[in-house]
Image (spheres, rainbow, N blue to C red):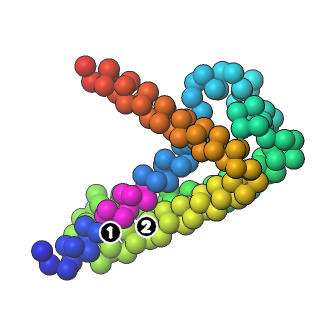
Amino acid sequence: MDIGKKYRWALTGLVIMIVLNAATLFTIWINQSDHDRRNYRSSDHDRGSMQEYLKEKIGLNDDQAESITDMRRGHYREIRTFRDSLEKNRRVYFEFIMSEEADNEQKRDSLRNLLTEQYENIEGLLYNHMTEVKELLNEEQQDKFEKLMLNMYFKDRNEARQQNRKAEN
């Protein structure tokens, strides 16, 4: 296998891993299971609902809850900018793939590198945000936070997989 093919496979693998990580972490933080939404969200954008939810599940005090809410707001503003830019560049990449010049390796690699860089930026922001949240928590709260995030993510993913399997049958 020549160097060019190895590079393309490595880059493709990196992009896929970054996309999966970004989607996973974003889904964990944003989404809650249906049960949690019904119990803790009186309206779609109830400011205090996440604070109350985290207070109950993790045992946050008022200062911790307020700090996390402020951090989340800032994080979402930052992420929104990157996601908007990423969406535009993904559209450009898709249009390139469907175009007559799709066999232009230099342009393809350039667009893929741009997307990879943007995914890395989003991953970095998410990593920094989660690290900041963890720094506010004591050891017991960190353990509860980790379990909560894992439970939300895997429960939602498993439910989605089960629904997809039912739809296929």
Secondary structure, magenta segment, majority class: helix
Residue labelled with disc 2:
116
Circle 1 sits in a helix, a strand or a loop, which is it?
Answer: helix
Residue 151 appears at what percent x and percent y?
Answer: 53, 35
Residue 99 appears at what percent x and percent y?
Answer: 28, 62
Question: Could you tell me if the residues under marks 1 and 2 are in contact, i.e. CB atoms within 8 Å?
Answer: yes
Say if residue 85 shows up in the picture: no
Q: Quadrant of residue 74?
A: bottom right
Residue 98 appears at what percent x and percent y?
Answer: 28, 57
Say if residue 41 shows up in the picture: yes
Residue labelled with disc 1:
11
Left or right relative to 48: residue 128: left
Measured Cα–Cα span from mark 1 to mark 2:
8 Å
Residue situated furthest left in the rendering = 1
Q: Is residue 60 above or below residue 86?
A: above
Name the one closer to the observer, 137 or 18: 137
The range drawn in magenta is 12-19
Left or right relative to 162: residue 82: right
Residue sitting at 63 percent across and 26 percent down? 36
Q: Quadrant of residue 127?
A: bottom right
Left or right relative to 123: residue 132: right
Check disc 1 and give the amino acid type: Leu
The quadrant the N terminus occupies is: bottom left
- Circle 2 packing at 10 Å, graded few (<14), some (14-19), many (20+), is many
The quadrant the C terminus occupies is: top left
Residue sitting at 71 percent across and 27 percent down? 41
